[in-house]
Amino acid sequence: MKTVTDGLVIKEMSIGEADKLITILTKDDGIVKAYASGVKSIKSKRSVGTTLLSYSNFSFSQKGNNLRVSEATPIKHFFSVDSDIEAFAISQYFCELCAVFEPHEKASSEFLRLILNSLHFLNEKSKSPFLIKAITELRIAAISGYCPNLVACEACGAYESDVMYFNYRDGSVFCKDCNKDGENIPLGITLLKAMRHIVYSPFERLYSFSVPDEAARALSKITERYITYQTERNFKTLEFLHTIYPENG
C-alpha cells in the first residue's frame, strides 16, 4: 500500500495508557489498521489527526506485519458532530457500514467521498439527517455490488404506476398490477424518484434534492431494511440510533 495517503478514522481502540489501534478508510487502499503510539497524550502532534471522525493525511511505516502511524496531519475535523447526539449516532453508523463492506483499492475513493460528503451535510444541518442516512445506505449498497434494479417493473417493464412495490430481498420493483408479494414495500412516486436519484445520479448531483420530513423518514426505513437484509447483519450503531428515534426502528 502507499505509505502516504488521506483517510478518515472510522474506529479507534485504546492500547495501554498512551497508544491506539485505529481503523482508517483511506483514499487509495480501502480499509487499513495502524498502530498510533503515544497519541493519547495531549502533547502528541498526532493526537488530533488520529481521533475518531478525523480526516487526515497519514504517513505510515512498516514494522514487521504491522503498520504504524508516523504522521497524521489533520485536514478536516468533524468535531461538531459530537455535540449533536443524533448526528453523531448516524455518523458512527456510517463508519460501521464502511467496516462491514470493507472497500478495497478500486472502490475506496468513491466510498471515502460519499462518507465525507454525508458527514459534511450532517454537520451543516441543511438536510434531514434521515435523508442523509438513506442516501448513504443506498449509495453504499450500489457501490458494493448490491445495487437494486429500480428502472422498471420486473414483470412487465412499466416505468412507473401510482404505487410501485419494492422487493427489499432482491432489490426489484413491481407495478401495482404485477405485485403479487404481500411483503413488498409500497413506494409512492416521491419515494420511487428519490431512490432512483440516489442509485443512478452522477455523484455531483447526489445530494441535490430534498423531500418532506415524513418522506425522508419513510425512505430511511426502506433503505435501512434493504441494507440490513442484504448484509444479514444487526448493526450495533443502528440499535443505539433506534433508542434515540424509536419510531424509526
Image (cartoon, rainbow, N blue to C red):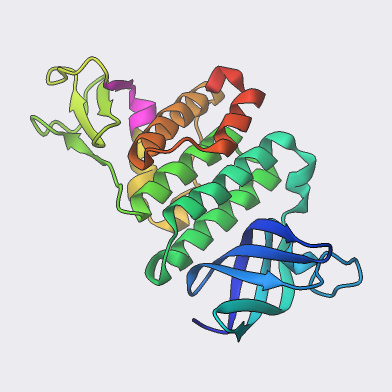
When the figure is inspected, residue 57 is found, relative to residue 230, above or below; the finding is below
Residue that sits furthest to the right in the current view? 43
Identify the residue at horizontal 23%, vertical 14% (top origin): 182
Q: Nearer the viewer, residue 79 or 23?
A: 23
Q: Which of 83/16 is in front?
A: 16
| Residue range (magenta) | 184-192
Is residue 194 visible in this depiction of the protein? no
What count of labels does the image hold? 0
Horizontal relation, residue 163 to residue 49: left or right: left
Q: Is residue 175 visible?
A: yes
* Residue in the foreground of this view, choosing between 215 and 171: 171
Q: Position of residue 124 (x, y in %)?
A: 69, 46
- The x, y position of residue 245, in whole percent, is 62, 23
The answer to whether 183 is drawn above or below residue 230 in the figure is above
Residue 187 part of the magenta-drawn span: yes
Q: Magenta stretch containing residue 238, yes or no? A: no
Q: Outermost residue toward the top?
A: 182
Q: Residue at x 11, y 34 (%)?
A: 157
Query: Vertically, is 249 above or below 210?
Result: above
**In the visual, does 80 lie left or right of 205?**
right
Residue 112 locus on image (x, y percent): 52, 62
What's the residue at 86%, 73% (across, down)? Answer: 44
Q: Is residue 142 above or below residue 47?
A: above
- Residue 213 lies, in percent from the top left, at 56, 25
Instruction: Name the residue rendered at 73%, 36% in the picture.
Output: 85
